[in-house]
Image: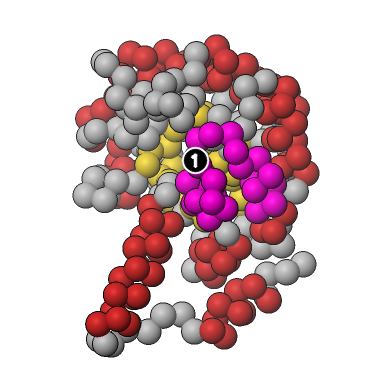
Amino acid sequence: MNERRAAFHALHHTGRPLLLPNAWDHASAAAYVARGYRAVGTTSLGVAAAAGLPDAAAATRAENVRLARALRGLPVLLTVDVEAGCADDPAAVADLAAELAALGVVGINIEDGRGDGDLDPPELTAAKVAAVKAAVPDLFVNARTDTWWLGVPDPLPETLRRAREYRNAGADGIFVPGTPDAGTIATLVARVDAPLNVLHRPGGPTLDELRSLGVARVSTGSLLFRVALGAALDALDTVRSGAALQEPPSYAEVQRLSGESRP
């Protein structure tokens, strides 16, 4: 197994959750690395919105590759959110995964939710997972099911069915965003035969609580991108009002994030 990919796999088996901040450009990823984060993911919403494209519409294949290329000089383990693989054809999804892996990417997220609010058939997502694992066997494939996220009736049995199919296809982790409470998370940890990834929810379980439940990975998703956008709007309102701004990162600090990370 590739050494960097093996290191990323190992981060899911430490007994404490891997807190994965999600980046949308070079500056955000470099800032996380400067704060000491060893692994970084991307946010599909942030990448799409920054490019003026819709999320979950298979529109960002080129942007994902471009961002992976831009981040390859950072000392970080990068996993890329490829939505549903930016294609319906499993072979095309595998081609994207191989292209990303050649740029140093150690993992991908692949989801069964569609932009129209429906779910792909589990057989299709499982075929995509299997194709990716056949192309790049040691790439960490985090298979996401949007059963709760999209409001499937009685989501627990459907989640477990899909998790089993994706795991049998070779998925290394299972991502279930939108889980409603600690009891549900504990049930998923006990019944899903793979490291469980959940999405951080403001006001939801803390990292310590998620550790006690056995969660392997906690993603921030689009949260940090949306917080950054909100902070920019707040700063603009503050300038307009004439009030004092809180000091942001300096020009030199931001310039250093770019300059010091290039190969």
> Which one is in front, 263 or 231?
231
The image shows residue 125, relative to residue 10, as above or below, that is: above
Q: What stretch of residues is rendered in magenta? A: 42-68
**Which residue shows up at 37% across the image and 42% down it?**
199
Answer with the quarter of the image where residue 211 lies. top left
Q: Amino acid at mark 1?
A: Asp
Answer with the quarter of the image where residue 246 lies. bottom left
The image shows residue 58, relative to residue 152, as above or below, that is: below
> Which one is in front, 235 or 263?
235
**Which residue shows up at 64% across the image and 73% down it?**
258
Whether 45 is among the magenta residues is yes
**Which residue shows up at 62% across the image and 52% down it?**
77
Whether 83 is among the magenta residues is no
Answer with the quarter of the image where residue 259 lies. bottom right
Q: Residues within 10 Å of mark 1 (few under 14, many from 20)?
A: some
Location of the C terminus (image quadrant): bottom right
Q: Give x and y (percent) for residue 176.
A: 39, 31
| Residue 87 seen in the figure | yes
Q: Give x and y (percent) for residue 111.
A: 50, 29
Residue at numbered disc 1: 55
Left or right placement of residue 91 versus residue 49 in this view: right
> Which one is in front, 70 or 186?
70
Left or right placement of residue 189 versus residue 2 in this view: left
Q: Give x and y (percent) for residue 253.
A: 54, 81
**Which residue shows up at 34% across the image and 46% down it?**
200
Location of the N terminus (image quadrant): top right
| Residue 105 seen in the figure | no
Secondary structure at numbered mark 1: loop
The image shows residue 234, relative to residue 221, as above or below, that is: below
